[in-house]
Amino acid sequence: MLRREPIGVVGQITPWNYPLMMAIWKIGPALAAGNTIVLKPASTTPESTLVLAGICGEFLPPGTFNVVLGNYTTGNLITSSPVPGLVSITGSVKAGIEVAQAGAPNLTQQHLELGGKAPCVVFADANLEAAATGIATAGYFNAGQDCTAACRVLVDEQVHDEFVAKLKAAAEEAKYGNPDEPDLLFGPLNSARQLASVQGFIDRLPAHVEIVTGGSRVDRVGYFFAPTVLDGARQDDEITQSEIFGPVITVQTFADENQAYEYANGVEFGLASSVWTTDHARALRASAALDYGCVWINTHIPLVAEFPHGGFKHSGYGKDLSIYAVEEYTRIKHVMSSME
């Protein structure tokens, strides 16, 4: 027989962009598999996790779900400890590498959901209005602070001008503000540090990149950055290869289908992608050709709990959501019996 058993103690580190949701994504499957948890939330967003811990403490046995607070030093105590049988982190590629290195001496199992640079491949036959609106929504949602954000458009050169005009209009219609304001798409960036990071990418733009709209901080209280469209990006540009993690969408062109996939896959990330076309056969070819853990067709960013979420390459390994996430928090034991 085969037994799926709990790993035992698992360490978990959650990010600041979706602090409550990421905590739930991690503790749900870990608890369902029978493990106990030590979780460290991001140092800038601990409160929602503490509220969740208080609720869980009302019905979980003592010591089942534990929250520790702190910065990098506290996280390193978890990742380098021989106690957890598995460490799970959602964070940057840099953070994931550090976690893997810290756990290597103990051969600690890793579950890494890391950065992304999602390409949106827009073919000439696509509904350009729907594509522009959908990509703007998925690119600026949560101020672009999302590893699956629609941040990198690859558009057929035949429809480039028309698409960029529509994307510009969608960007300028995107509503942002404080959380208590109605009908908003996004709020401010997480911190002054994140604002400076996003602005730094704009300040370092090469001369061939055009700021179509946005490109600067908004003149209001808070760490707001204007919805931005950058046109003329090239494959080796920093803005193409690096995760900006802000409300910034870049635009490149391609000449044919093969070049579209070459450009789309030509980054170190492999988390999420989308293809926009009315040709179903082409969409299915794209789903096979795109080297990403998630491929959306004529949409971008919706996720459902029944399907796994995770990436390839430097976007990490291991799955969140679905039964596959529960399996990540188990170990498999082979039992063979001979009874007289």
Image: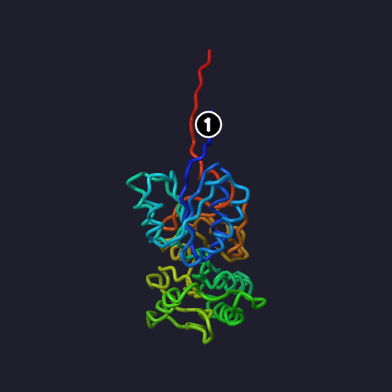
Q: Is 172 placed left or right of 108 in the picture? A: right
Q: Amino acid at mark 1?
A: Leu
User: Looking at the rendering, which quadrant does residue 54 occupy?
Assistant: bottom right
Residue at the left extreme?
Answer: 105
Q: Is residue 142 visible from the viewing direction of this image?
A: yes
Residue under the point 45% across and 78% down: 232
* Residue drawn at (47%, 63%) of the image: 42
Q: Is residue 92 left or right of residue 185?
A: left
Q: Is residue 201 left or right of residue 218?
A: left
Q: Position of residue 143 (x, y in %)?
A: 54, 73
Residue 270: in sight, yes or no?
A: no
- In the image, residue 207 lies at what x, y percent? 38, 83
Instruction: Farthest residue to the top: give it.
Output: 340
User: Furthest-right residue in view?
Assistant: 182
Residue at image location 35% in from the left, 52% down from the top: 102
Way the structure is coloured:
rainbow
**Place of residue 334 in the rendered image (x, y in percent of width and height, measured from the top left):** 48, 30
**Mark 1, residues whose alpha carbon is within 10 Å: few (<14), some, or many (≥20)?**
few
Where does residue 6 sit, x and y in percent of width and height?
51, 40
Of the 4 image quadrants, the one containing the N terminus is top right
In the drawing, does residue 199 fall left or right of residue 227?
left
**Quadrant in the picture for residue 181:** bottom right
Which residue is denoted by mark 1 in the rendering?
2
Circle 1 sits in a helix, a strand or a loop, which is it? Answer: strand
- Tell which of 209 and 163 is nearer to you: 209
Figure disc tally: 1
> 291 or 158: nearer the eye?
291
